[in-house]
Amino acid sequence: MTWTNPLTLLRHGWTRHWNPDRPVRTVVSNLPFEDLKKREQPNRRYEGNAIRTNKYRLWSFIPMNLFEQFHRMANIYFVGLAILNFVPVVNAFQPEVALIPICIILALTAVKDGWEDFRRYQTDQQLNNTPCFIFSRKQMCFVERRWKDVRVGDFVRVLSNEIIPADILLLHTSDPNGVCHMETANLDGETSLKQRKVVPGFSSLGEPFQPQTFDSTVVCENPNNNLNLFKGYVERPDKRRTGFGIDSLLLRGCMVRNTDDAAGIVVYAGHETKSMLNNSGPRYKRSKIERKMNTDVLFCVVLLFFMCLIGALGHAIWLETFSSMPSYIVPDSNGNYTPSVLAGFYMFFTMIILLQVMIPVSLYVSIELVKMGQIFFITQDVELYDEELDRRVQCRALNITEDLGQIQYVFSDKTGTLTENKMVFRRCSVMGTEYCHEENVVVPDRKLILEVDRQMASIQTGPYLDFFLALAICNTVLVSSVTAQRQRVRVNVADLAGAERVGDVLRVKGRRSSSYSGGSFHNMRQWFRKCGLGKVFTSMKFFKRGGETLADPFSIDEDDGLSGSEEVCYEAHSPDEAALIHAAKAYGFTMMERTPHYVTVKLPDEALLKFEVLDILTFDSTRRRMSIIVRHPHTKEIIMYTKGADSAIMERLGNVFSDCCSKIKCVEQWCGWKAVCFSLKVISEQEFRAWSAVRQEALSAIEEKEERLMETANFIESSFTLLGATGIEDRLQESVPETIQALRRAGMQVWVLTGDKPETAINIAYSCKLLEHEDLVFTFSTNRKVLQCQLTNASFRGYSSAFTGPLMEPSIGLVIDGPTLSMAMSDELVEQFVELCKHCRAVLCCRVTPLQKSAVVKLIRQKLRVMTLAVGDGANDVNMIQAADVGIGVSGQEGMQAVMASDFAITRFKHLQRLLLVHGHWCYSRLANMVIYFFYKNVAYVNLLFWYQFFCGFSATAMIDYWLMIFFNLFFTSAPPIMFGIMEKEVSDSTLLSLPELYKRGQHSEGYRRSTFWIAILDAFYQSLVCFFIPYWTYNGSDIGIFAFGTPMNTVSLFTIILHLAIEIKSWTAVHWVIMIGSVLVYFIVTLAYSAICISCNPPSDPYWIMHKQMADPMFYLVCILTTVVALLPR
Amino acid sequence: MMASSYNAKDEDGHHPGSVGSGGPGAVKSKKPDNTAFKQQRLPAWQPILTAGTVLPAFFMIGLIFIPIGIGLLVTSNNIKEFEIDYTGVDMFSPCFNCSQSYSWNSTSACTCSVPFTLDQPFESNVFMYYGLSNFYQNHRRYVKSRDDSQLNGDKSSLLNPSKECEPYRTSDKKSIAPCGAIANSLFNDTLELFYIHPNGSRIAIHLVKTGIAWWTDKHVKFRNPGENNNNLSIVFQDTSKPVNWRKPVYELDPSDPDNNGFINEDFIVWMRTAALPTFRKLYRIIQKKKDNMTPTLPPGNYSLEVIYNYPVRSFDGRKRMILSTISWMGGKNPFLGIAYITVGSVCFFLGVVLLIIHHKYGNRNNNADIPN
């Protein structure tokens, strides 16, 4: 439910009004106007940087909250009834009194909304008050201000590892090349660094940035939410224009990395920044139960309608029976009697008012309260807490807890969800010999070390050396300086009070990478200032030691004993590269520095080799390899090192080594691991020069640039010499197979959707027990587009028929790749595909795009009408997470994007088991039972009134005092069901975990189906009949007064309703006892007090002393006992 | 303790700082407290319905309910009750003439006398009721049509009654006291009892007209306006009588100032509206004789003298006079006793049936839960 503040709309409208014919925004520097009033500021029309995501303000809270609450049908219904009550001819109660329940409901909801909004307000305030540096003309330097002070046109400086406060056009960086690195993890979840360039012509190297000299005008497009598109130009006073694009824009929310400082002019601020425009706010999901419940509410409305109709007809007919008006029929104020038909018509509305409780007014509020309670307990679950990340399970969607208990299809991402997404160097094979590394930390293999040492000592070259050199340099890993890292470390330990523990903490927290706060950084600096220099020194030392651990998100824990001077930190684009470069380092080949033109590697004997980089052929998914062409510093040979997937290298090997066959064999055996092969090619000077010329031409080509570049790359990347192969493992997370087994046993279909290649995916599928070895696995993959259609069509048909046949295989796995999938999901095949999938035990989709992932989820969800759950960790899973009924984000290595989009965020895949099987089941059965109970309760109570209509001429008399009626629903009987919905534990968690089959109850909606609803309604009818007619026959013909007659009924129905719940409750804790007994006590105390005090305060009824009188009468107790027993006997 | 063993690590806990969450005091692990409440591990009693618990319950209910039922039935049967319809719908009934000449405002009183015979003596106090049938005192608009604060002696309400009283709120520009439809339709028959001695003489039976209303009603809820002013005619001078009444409220019982005006007990009883269309209301009490030797009402012939004022023909109503002794359970009503006995027997019977089932089939599955 996206909700736009009307004021914002208004403001937008206003802004639009102000610049109607400006598709672009012009920004000039604020500095010349610094002292002017706001009205004279040139950029005054643009929004400031302060953000406000809270919906309400103090003064507008009540009207706006009410306005919003009236979007809910039920509330309109009740307000409508309350208004109806003000119409004199139909009113059933005192009009003011009728307002009470709806007011209480509205007030409760308002308090809840207000609290949520206040929390939002607090986070906004925190953000708005984050410090940043703005240039001030008066002081001629950057001064510290708050985020909210940033305005469009300001010059802002961002230091390394600080978060960017607004969208800033980059004008200056400390980097000599005029680039600045930015981590966009907060935005799109990608941890890789993005390069941003200074707008050409403004980067004056080495000079300090002087904003006061900026006299140009920035013209750019109006704010939009496209993160990858930005256009504009800078117009200088002399009308010279310089264009710029997205690669000059620093985005709000991102973090500056590897650049000491960057500065620029703010072009978009606050809500107009790209990140805020992308932030669409929480989604409103409706749970399955709620949807079902709404139809049942409609049933109640129909029921109510019929009851009122009976009342109206009954009243009209009753009036018809009188020839002349008896003295107890009161004429209107003029002394006229309403004609019976009209009276019946009026009576219809009066009846609606009288019987309004039929529609459970408190149901919605109770459900919300219950869900809050459920969420509280889910987040409090200590078993879903991740010690390592210090993160609990997060519930981001507040209203679909019970959907967790009804999941039928689970769609899972592979990398990072099933697996750790931490690459571990497992083995390598050089010269046909395999060296294994079993530990997660690379401990050099002794034999291999020996070989290396031998070669080092003797010939200074050889395949072993080349292999490790390739490992070390053939990558795009950036080396960050220790200084840059230091600040990062600081942020990490910002909250610590003592420097002594810094080292420990660093090791514990080493893996956390993505979320640092500018605020804590700031605090840290202040803290340092306070501590004085001595302590800073000590902590610095710790930083150096710990720095290595922090080096990059994918780092493997290193020994802390390395001396500080050798510190290097790697910023790797992919986990594989990180694993490889660390492996090389473990063998002594450390990459020390990388500049665009040189790569320096330290050899095991401490010698430094400085390679001149001649060219880098970057990785792309078609070639699946990358190469680096370097000139060896000693031999001056031009060498090309290539690494790539095994198949990509093998097909291009030149002179085949003797052991090639065995190598291939062993590589193939490394199932489950990513095999990366390394190869080398020595290129002669002439050859390189010739190629280089072609390459340059291709680079400068305008047409078909991509193709030509590819061609050149393919040309040079041939006839390699194989150096060796490495096996990198992406480890499975703990307990993944168990979890999948449990989910399976619970009747869920588990699908894995991955962007990975089929081989890896299948291997993982086997190792996580998604596929069993005895399974029949169909693999669909097509390469040629011509044949595909008929082929797949035929095969689908064939398989489908096979399944229906008697020889049906019990477990079928289906592996399908992206292109085939898109075919399978084409219109003509989709039915068969779905049919096929229904029979499959496991489905594995490989090489699927994020869009396809969500398409698959949507397809299954719509075609099979099942509850789906998608779990993923990366930005590529966002679509899928949003498409599914329940989206679960794994807060893992790939940033927060998935978590942001998810309804629940967990840290490990295994938590899914507990989340679904235990909490899902609980939440579902609790809520289902509670909803049913609510319907039952209201129907049972309302029917008491309804039966009475047969004995009072359908005149809509209530025999129960109206206040007590309100209290009955709001206080006496509301706490027990809420407690029931929050705390009921029908089956213990250990049972649920050990018997996942119990989950099927929720999948088939057994807790809440139409029949359950009608049974509850019938039960309510029966109980209300008992509760009415036993007192009726007891008191019939006696001298009992109306309200003396209603009191035992009220009491009896209270007992019945409470005891009914008591029978439903399967486990009684102290809380249960207190609330149950408390409710009954409150009833008696309130009623007694009320009838003792109220002498003439509630005119039509005269509750005075009735309860006391009744409670002194033994008959009262006898009636209560008998009625309760009879009412509950069938249960 | 689990919790304490985690504490050491908690100290090192780090806030995975999302933007802006790094206040100095924020060093707090997010690890949830490992308490029984938060982990939903509170000690719980889980009642499981087995044959072992359900069967005794059934027998218990049976064993308790049947004696109660028998007791109730016996008590109810010991209550003596006599009821006579004096409406006069029948041509030959004594009050036929009176019932025909219906008018609220007829000035001449119509009297009739209804003879009846008591076969059994009525011991101790005898309560005399009038009963009305088909009189919907529980009609919503009727029930509302009163002003409790006026009846409570409120001066301002006396002169300006509540709107609820419409159209019986004012007459002749004066407010009506007591206002409203309930008061307006006050039962105004006068009933008198005579014992016809075998020797032919008629002995009037002394009917006590106080003590018939609830004590709280008489002393708290209903009060005459004007505090201690005993001259009610002055207190009520600016009001007019309800349209159907023959005499104003301060003449309801001129003989007894404590039973006059709003605190007239007949009036109070009437104002406590009946729950059901067939109802009785306490009219008089016949106190037992002091000597205790003779019954309050010996068997024999009696005559009920009715001053017939109250019209019921328009709604096909009936008027009755009821004489009843009373017990701790109120008037005569065998229903409750029968219901108790029935429910008790059913429970007992069910218990037996279940016991047999349990014995026959229980061996196969000892844990067979009896579904609730």
Image (cartoon, helix red, strand yellow):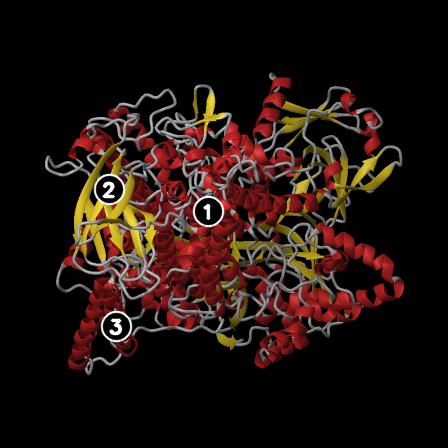
First along the sequence among labels 3 and 2: 3
Report the Cα–Cα distance between label 3 and label 1: 38 Å
- Chain containing mark 1: B
Residue positioned most to the left: B92
Q: What percent of the width, then of the height, locates residue A379?
A: 53, 60
- Chain containing mark 3: B
Q: What percent of the width, then of the height, locates residue A702?
A: 55, 33
Labels 3 and 2 touching (C-beta < 8 A): no
Q: Residue at the location (53% across, 30% down)? A: B234
Q: Which residue is mark 2?
A: B305
Rendered view: B368 above or below A310: below
Q: What percent of the width, then of the height, locates residue B300?
A: 18, 55
First along the sequence among labels 3 and 1: 3
Which residue type carries mark 3? Pro
Report the Cα–Cα distance between label 1 and label 2: 28 Å
The residue closer to the viewer here, A542 or A975, is: A975
- Chain containing mark 2: B
Report whether B123 appears left or right of A699.
left
Which residue type carries mark 2? Glu
First along the sequence among labels 1 and 2: 1
Q: Which residue is mark 3?
A: B67
- At mark 1, the secondary structure is helix
Labels 3 and 1 touching (C-beta < 8 A): no
Q: Quadrant of residue B320?
A: top left
Report whether A235 appears left or right of A1038.
right
Q: Which residue is mark 1?
A: B218
